[in-house]
Amino acid sequence: MKSNMLEYLEKTAERVPERIAFYDEREELSYGNLKEVSRRIGTALLKIAAPKKTVALFLDARSIRNIPAIYGVLYAGCAYAPLDISMPPERLLKLLSLLDPGVVLADEKGRRALQDLELGEVPVLPYEEAAKEDCDREKLELVRRKISIYDPMSILYTSGSTGIPKGSIQTHFSYLHWTEATIEVYGFDEKVVFGNQSPFFYANSIIDIFPPVALGATVYLLPSGILNFPKKFMECLNRNRISELTMTPSSFITMVKAGVVEEGSLPWLRYGIMSGESMPWEPLKIWMDASPGADWWHFYGSTEMFSVAVGKVGGQKPKDPRLPVGKLFSKVHVLFMDEDGNEVPFGEPGELFVSSPWIAAGYYRDEIRTEEFWSIDPLKRGWYERFYRSGDMGYLREDGQMVILGRRDTQIKHMGYRMELGEVEAALRAVQGGQEVCVLFQKDTGKIWCFYTGTLSERELRKEMKTRLPGYMLPDVFVHLEEMPYTASMKLDRSKLRDMMSEKM
């Protein structure tokens, strides 16, 4: 087992320096070039930020520059935090305040996003300058000797129920184990051509970065917004002979609805991987017919857990409507707990607690929520084992397949992103000036409903919300009420609101 994720890059660059590592429609990076540019960026960062600090990445989310930026941060002995620069300025400021980075590494597009922000004394390093810095091998080697396998490697932000985003900390130890396990379970090799569609601030993108680098495989970055042009999307996959594609089910379904996924139309695809949501059988079967040489997989996980279980989909429609999410990775151990903290009998539903070498180290600079979601030896057995409390309800079947039934609380998956309804409510309350709001998720339709009181019109509310939240967190339906319904004990009657949703469908 390696001790630093940079060792994969260095070994691959030594073995196949001329091989294309990452490319898009405009430029390409060989493994030798990737290593060289990353070391230049690492040297530039060390002139500004001390090792073990965090570096905020303000880069075009679909740019190839994200890759040397990430590895450059690792060469500097720091942790990278990729941020969505298309977010409203108010949210970006909140994230930067939580992160307290040692430096912001920004390309031209990122620097434009920074113009509306008051960073204070946080230095901004232009990507273009960093990539031209003379490499200081001695300084990089000195930093390398001081970095632990348990040091943070990335801070990936997710939605928070209190209105405060959560920064999930993953260490080199986490990534090393996850990378090896991922390559093993899917059977990836260096001949795979990965098709990257996920933006690099999204946890799903890690499957298109670290396993390929470890193997010496090639990654093609699909053009930004290509999903809006289904025919071009399919042409892109075939022209570049994409053999691995990870997307959310909603993205796969979009292509089916456009009528471009035809039988036998994807002869190069070998791995179709669905993440983030449940995939209906009918559109999945269309994709399976289009890619006769592919295995189709679904996996269960989150930003805090990475992958927990993975399953290969068979060729026949399952009889059980509650589709399993696959079998546990070999290094994953789970518990299913009741509300009293006791383990439920095998096969009965309970809240999922997950232990693995790659669960997150906690939430960055957030001791309270770290203690809430991570626990050591929750069953009081008398030995150290650290678990993440997922909030998902589920159980294991006799055949080892895991079934997930839904959320224990209000955390949901919307448009492929994990998010908290409470954060949407917090933003709405801020807009409403103390007026009542309630946000519910309608699972059947995948829509977020906003019930609200007050004097603002729907148009005014929608306009204001767009300045506070990213697009995937915005409610789909707004319902204005004169007053909220309450139960006899003066609690908000959510069941009545759910009835309203059904009536208005």
Image (cartoon, rainbow, N blue to C red):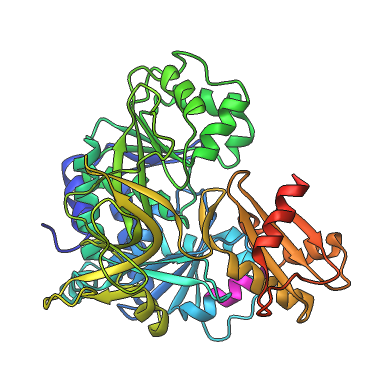
Magenta stretch: give its range: 88-95
Near-viewer residue (354 or 54): 354
**Percent position of residue 259, x then y:** 61, 21
Q: Residue lying furthest top in this view?
A: 264
The correct choice, above or below, for 390 with respect to 403 in the image is below
**Percent position of residue 221, x then y:** 46, 40
Does residue 102 show up magenta in the picture? no
Near-viewer residue (211 or 353): 353
Q: Is residue 185 visible?
A: yes
Q: Residue lying furthest front in this view?
A: 488
Q: How many marks?
A: 0
Q: Quadrant of the C terminus?
A: top right
- 122 with respect to 467 (left or right): left
Does residue 89 show up magenta in the picture? yes
> Magenta stretch: dominant SS?
helix
- 203 with respect to 84 (left or right): left
What residue is rendered at 63% in x and 63% in y?
A: 87
What residue is rendered at 53% in x and 81% in y?
A: 97
Q: Is residue 116 visible?
A: no
**Percent position of residue 212, x then y:** 29, 43
The correct choice, above or below, for 230 with respect to 410 in the image is above
- 338 with respect to 116 (left or right): left
Looking at the rendering, which quadrant does residue 360 occupy? bottom left
Q: Quadrant of the N terminus?
A: bottom left
The correct choice, above or below, for 499 with respect to 492 in the image is above
